[in-house]
Image (cartoon, helix red, strand yellow):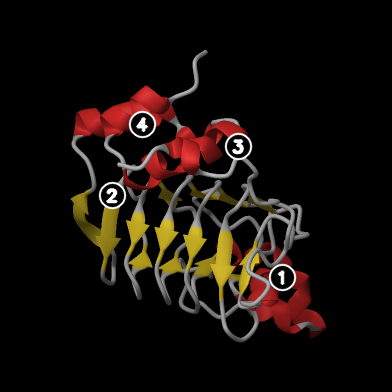
Amino acid sequence: MRSDAAVSPVPPDPSTLHPMPEQPRVVLLKPLVTSPLIEIGAYSYYDDPDEATAFETRNVLYHYGPEKLVIGKFCALGTGVRFLMNGANHRMDGPSTFPFPIMGGSWAEHVDLITGLPGRGDTVVGNDVWIGYGATVMPGVRIGHGAIVASGAVVVDDVPDYGIVGGNPATLIRTRYSESEVARLLALAWWDWPVDHLTRHLRTVMSGTVEDLEAAAPST
């Protein structure tokens, strides 16, 4: 393996909207989003050839609050990834699911019928998560660190750390590491390393073993 010392110690700027100027389809999400209901970690990006900068309105849907969308650091989101938030819910305990009060008029007097609907809380995506093209994440789902969501998947349940899921509804295909290795990776939490240290050990983070990563971890 080539020495990490060959890597430039100067990391990219996490506040740059387009990290690849020749590819405006790629945007870093942290400097893009403005909603207080969306939290994005450094270097997480979205790729869309048409309207990448419209992520907040085109890809986070029915977001009327108070639930938050929380996405960790170093996440890769493919074109068309969508997060459906709890505002999409309708009542299901009566004969009709139609949300009459939102139509206005005297129907609006019954707004209590559509407020306070049960939800699953915040939607949380861990660090270093890859979500493939056209995947849909349902309200209140928690996707673990290092997980992979296959293209077109509909994620209705929580995804374990370093799990790979796919299908509709998404099911666990396999885990990327053994249970003991996952515990070691979570303890290392490379995504929280100082960025200069991470830069020096980039090749290990991308292609090394768990043992290599442990050897490269910053001293505490």
The percent position of residue 151, horizontal first and vertical second, equals 35, 73
- Which SS class for mark 4? helix
Residue position for label 4: 213
- Which SS class for mark 3? helix
Residue position for label 3: 195
Amino acid type shown at disc 4: Leu
Left or right of residue 175: residue 154: right
Left or right of residue 15: residue 197: left
- Which label belongs to residue 23? none
Amino acid type shown at disc 1: His
Q: Earlier in the sequence, mark 4 or mark 3?
A: 3
Q: Earlier in the sequence, mark 4 or mark 2?
A: 2
Distance from the alpha carbon under mark 1 to that under mark 3: 52 Å
Left or right of residue 16: residue 201: left
Left or right of residue 15: residue 212: left
Q: Residue at x 57, y 84 (%)?
A: 49
- Which SS class for mark 1? helix
Number of other residues with Cα within 10 Å of mark 1, as a class: few under 14, some 14 to 19, many 20 or more: some
Distance from the alpha carbon under mark 2 to that under mark 1: 43 Å
Compared with residue 46, is residue 118 higher up or lower down, i.e. above or below?
A: above
Residue 114 visible to the viewer: no
- Which SS class for mark 2? strand
